Amino acid sequence: MTYSKAMEADRYRKLRIELDGNKQDATKERNKSLMDLNTWMGHFYTIARIELKEHPQLLESLDKVVKS
């Protein structure tokens, strides 16, 4: 293997490591965003249950089952 081929292989190895790190960061960010959204939706549904207590059909329109 020539010197330039070895340098090229090393450059590609470093690029692959960098891209793998970027993918891991993106996955962590996605998971955090989904957890934040889940928390927000929990608060939203809690408030909706309180506010729509007199109108259960509206709560059902939010895909929340209302016990009769």
Image (cartoon, rainbow, N blue to C red):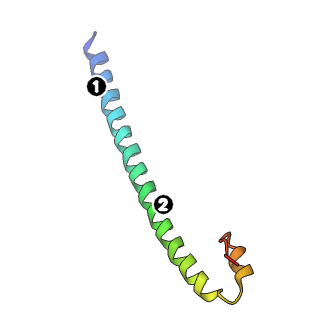
Query: Height in image: 28 above or below 18?
Result: below
- Mark 1 nearby-residue class (10 Å; few <14, some 14–19, many ≥20): few
Query: What separation in Å lies between label 1 and label 2 (alpha carbons)?
Result: 36 Å
In the picture as drawn, the residue positioned furthest to the front comes out as 68
Residue 55, image x, y percentages: 71, 86
In the picture as drawn, the residue positioned furthest to the top comes out as 1
Residue at 68 percent across and 78 percent down: it is 59
Residue 46, image x, y percentages: 54, 79
Residue nearest the viewer, comparing 9 with 22: 22
Residue at 45 percent across and 62 percent down: it is 35
Residue 39, image x, y percentages: 47, 70
Q: Which residue is mark 1?
A: 10
Q: Secondary structure at mark 2?
A: helix
Using the rendered view, name the quadrant where residue 19 is placed: top left
Q: Secondary structure at mark 1?
A: helix
Q: Is residue 37 left or right of residue 11?
A: right
Instruction: Tell me the quadrant of the picture where the N terminus can be found.
Output: top left
Q: Is residue 58 left or right of residue 7?
A: right
Residue nearest the viewer, comparing 66 with 40: 66
Q: Which residue is mark 2?
A: 34
**At label 2, which amino acid type do we have?**
Leu
Query: Height in image: 33 above or below 7?
Result: below
**At label 1, which amino acid type do we have?**
Asp
Instruction: Tell me the quadrant of the picture where the C terminus can be found.
Output: bottom right
Query: Height in image: 18 above or below 60?
Result: above
Q: Earlier in the sequence, mark 1 or mark 2?
A: 1
Task: Count numbered badges in the picture.
Answer: 2
Q: Is residue 40 left or right of residue 67?
A: left
Residue 37, image x, y percentages: 50, 66
Residue at 27 percent across and 22 percent down: it is 7
Using the rendered view, name the quadrant where residue 12 is placed: top left
